């Protein structure tokens, strides 16, 4: 079945951004202590994360890759992960320093991409996509009501995400510099 012309991969990306407040609401529901809503919040963020895969695949398969989508998709990813990290940090369930490191890189690279857009949009690399996956799952583990015996796993996973976040940030700068 063919989708209506007004429904595009970019529509899916914008929808992802518009649904983020529902995820934030569920994180904070009942002071963030309701385990049922912690699981619901994780499910919402997981489904929104899946739309990131869906819109990209759809855009490539239907030859609907646009400059707007190439730029907007990573912005949606940053809004999604940023809203979760900030919410969990406010609740004391996620380290603020990790939130700052990841958001500093994400916002910095977004501003950088805007400043150098005249040189062409820098698309997400395979490392950037891997970074996004590690960030999503890593933050998701802090969202779930997991036993403290799994703290080593949560922190190890998010540690890999932090390393990927930093290294892919430098990779964007290197790629741009080499293209100049």
Image (tube, helix red, strand yellow):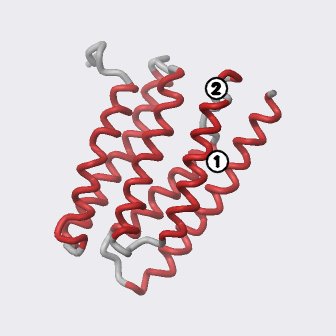
Please tell me how many numbered marks the rendered image carries.
Answer: 2
| Image disc number at residue 50 | none
Residue at x-position 42% and y-position 27%: 58
Quarter containing the C terminus? top right
Badge 1 crowding class, 10 Å Cα cut-off, few under 14, some 14 to 19, many 20 or more, is: some
- Looking at the image, do the residues carrying marks 2 and 1 touch, with CB atoms under 8 Å apart? no
| Nearer mark to the viewer, of 2 and 1 | 2
Q: From what the image shows, is residue 118 above or below residue 175? A: above
Quarter containing the N terminus? top left
Name the element at disc 1: helix
Name the residue tied to disc 1: 127
Residue 146, picture quadrant: bottom left
Q: Is residue 89 left or right of residue 164?
A: left
- Which tag, 2 or 1, sits closer to the chain's start? 2
Of residue 164 and residue 18, the one placed in the foreground of this image is 18
Q: From what the image shows, is residue 85 above or below residue 21? A: below
Name the element at disc 2: helix
**Position in image of residue 77 (x %, y %):** 45, 44
Residue at x-position 34% and y-position 45%: 48
Residue at x-position 21% and y-position 71%: 31
Q: From what the image shows, is residue 80 above or below residue 58? A: below
Of residue 7 and residue 29, the one placed in the foreground of this image is 29
Name the residue tied to disc 2: 117
Badge 2 crowding class, 10 Å Cα cut-off, few under 14, some 14 to 19, many 20 or more, is: few
Of residue 11 and residue 111, the one placed in the foreground of this image is 111
Q: Is residue 150 left or right of residue 117?
A: left
Residue at x-position 60% and y-position 31%: 114
């Amino acid at each position: 079945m063919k989708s209506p012309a007004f429904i595009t991969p970019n529509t899916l990306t914008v929808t992802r951004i518009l649904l983020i407040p529902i995820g934030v609401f569920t994180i904070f529901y009942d002071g963030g202590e309701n385990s049922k809503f912690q699981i619901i919040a994780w499910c919402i963020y997981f489904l929104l994360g899946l739309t990131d895969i869906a819109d990209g695949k759809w855009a490539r398969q239907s030859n609907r890759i646009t400059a707007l989508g190439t730029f907007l998709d990573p912005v949606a990813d940053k809004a999604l992960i940023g809203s979760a990290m900030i919410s969990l940090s406010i609740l004391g369930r996620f380290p603020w320093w990790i939130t700052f490191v990841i958001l500093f890189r994400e916002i910095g690279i977004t501003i950088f991409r805007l400043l150098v857009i005249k040189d062409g949009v820098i698309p997400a690399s395979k490392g950037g996509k891997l970074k996004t996956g590690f960030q999503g799952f890593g933050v998701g583990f802090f969202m779930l009501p997991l036993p403290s015996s799994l703290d080593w796993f949560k922190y190890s996973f998010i540690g890999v995400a932090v390393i990927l976040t930093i290294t892919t940030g430098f990779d964007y700068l290197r790629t741009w510099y080499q293209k100049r």
